[in-house]
Image (cartoon, grey):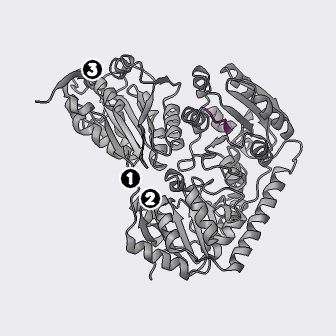
Amino acid sequence: MSHTTRLTTAQAIVKFVRAQTSMRDGIAQSFFAGCFGIFGHGNIAGMGQALQQNADFPYWQARNEQAMVHSAVAYARHNNRKRALLCTSSIGPGATNMVTGAAVATVNRLPVLLIPGDTFARRNVAPVLQQVETAGSQDITANDAFKPVSRYWDRISRPEQLLTALPEAMRVLTSAAETGAVTLCLPQDTATEAFDYPDDLFNHRVWRINRNRAERESVLVAARWIQQSQKPMIVAGGGVRYSEASEVLTKFVDATGIPLGESMAGKGSVRFDNVHCMGAIGATGTQAANDVARDADLVIGIGTRYSDFTTASKSVWQNPSVRFININVAEFDAAKQGALCLTGDAKVTIEELGELLTGWHVETGYEQANRIRHDNWETLVQRQFDRRNSPLPAQSEIIGAVNEHGDPNAVLVCAAGSLPGDLHKLWRARHPSQYHVEYGFSTMGYEIAGGLGVKMADPSREVYVMVGDGSYLMLSSEIVTSIQYGYKLTIVLIDNSGYQSIGGLSRSLGQAGFGTRFVSNLTSQPALDDDVPHEPLHVDLAANAASLGAEVIRCGSTMDVVAALEKAKAYTRTTVIYVCNDRYAGTPGFGWWDVPPAEVSEPPSVREARARWESDRGAQRTFLTASE
């Protein structure tokens, strides 16, 4: 006869998650490292009480619900998806604040367990505070907004539903192919209701993250395609990192001479100074990688989902005979571009291909040409680092200061604006975990919260957060959280006096940067254009950071930033290095991004942009199923 323990629904959730372990390559570790939360009437009596009586299960108090999910997502990414965090919120706005974070997790294929409070399951007191009512159904709440951005979604309206919901949640969270946000909506009355749970539910369980192997016949075909190719290339995506395949990939490119381009998530898969590493590919790609891509007759995609930035909106590959081989744990991604699908783990699949290709190497002339491309690009990077723009530094100089004078073992965190594009091209990644840029959802506000999550996952490493003023103003609150819990971040805050990235995009569309500057005393619509004289907005972001408890170092030049990086090492709490930059001093671009200008417009500049776009569209390709 099975023994039972009487627990509330919330207590049962906490007890269950504490018993879950993940294992890969024989190494086991507790899957959940703790819980982020902000309490309100929808979760304080349920999850709040359950966490309080489990004092040895870490709980961190956040400042913003969206931010705490970003921190959890960053934590999971830095742990290569082998560990995760819970996030709990109250009902209403506390819950919906987490929707953006859920999308970040799901788009980037990163595990996080969300437990938003919900309205009353028994309904008799409805409408309760913060309930969203719908005339057509009483079974819809604000938490239904999580459905399209969750990989698994459930509403726990009865305590016994945990018996099936919790194992299913864990299956998804530990699945290499299906992981993302898992949302368990918890009505506040159900959360506090008790049930006699079978003790078997709380037994220690190991969830094996297996290295699934691709079908052997497909691997043999892939090896044959590679041997037949004249100009193959690799596109390394985030799956290389999550599979911990960087070492075997480096051996593979060294043995075969196949050049490699990196997606935003895959940057750092191979060290920047490896001669086969062409750097970033696509819309924000390097000249080296995009030149290789243009002529490639075979593309080997490893752990990439082929976003429009990686493919330069399907314009980067121009060889009419190009074929694709995709290595991916998710069949959905493996099948993209009409590819030969190798549905399996990146590390073991690369190893199998390497064995089949023993002794094979690209032609000498092709390898030599790519070495020259690599070296020429590194020369251009150095010129961007050393450009010494005046009177304000260019963004590339600031990136160079952090890259060259920061801790080489540190982790860089960024997410949105013009910084990711420049970092993708210019940052010299020295280890697989160094480049942490969230660009699957490109979420403004991820940066500081994400940096906190990385530091929590790896306290021994220095964490550099690079953030523009736009993202900083959206979500800087977790500076306080980092200080409260003693997780020191070094934040490089770049003041662009507006939205630099969209300002540049606006100008390229013939729209004069409309609505992208931070301007004082606005009296008319034209004052929002870049070419109209304006009074800058007098907001002291450095003083704001200091008011949140950070150490602050103000800088006026690139050399000031270099000195500040050294000075920041001596500080024990989060430090903000503040510097203004020239928002018009951009980095050269070598890829295209499909953003259509208005088809009909009064300004000639917009009509000209439309004509350029229509011409550029001619380079877009549709890739259908490849044949033998």
Residue at left offset 49%, top offset 74%:
356
Q: Residues within 10 Å of mark 2 (few under 14, many from 20)?
A: many
Q: Amino acid at mark 2?
A: Asp
Check if mark 2's residue and mark 1's residue have beta carbons within 8 Å: yes
Q: Position of residue 406 (x, y in %)?
A: 75, 40
Q: Amino acid at mark 1?
A: Asn
Q: Position of residue 498 (x, y in %)?
A: 71, 40
Vertical placement of residue 580 versus 277, above or below:
above
Residue at left offset 49%, top offset 49%:
108
Residue identified by numbered label 3 = 192
Q: Nearer the viewer, residue 509 or 29?
A: 29
In primary-sequence order, the first of circles 3 and 1 is 3
Q: Nearer the viewer, residue 472 or 302?
A: 302
Would residue 166 be found to the left or right of residue 476 on screen?
A: left
Q: Position of residue 465 (x, y in %)?
A: 66, 37
Residue identified by numbered label 2 = 345
Residue 283 magenta-drawn?
no
Residue at left offset 16%, top offset 26%:
3
Task: For marks 2 and 1, give the CA distance.
Answer: 8 Å
Q: Secondary structure at mark 3?
A: helix
Check if mark 3's residue and mark 1's residue have beta carbons within 8 Å: no
Q: Secondary structure at mark 2?
A: loop
Residue identified by numbered label 1 = 210
Farthest residue toward the left? 1
Q: Nearer the viewer, residue 206 or 483?
A: 206
Please state which of the two labelled residues, at mark 2 or mark 3, is closer to the viewer: 2
Give the residues in magenta.
Answer: 460-465
Q: Amino acid at mark 3?
A: Thr
In primary-sequence order, the first of circles 2 and 3 is 3
Q: Position of residue 155 (x, y in %)?
A: 28, 35
Q: Secondary structure at mark 1?
A: loop
Vertical placement of residue 28 versus 178, above or below:
above
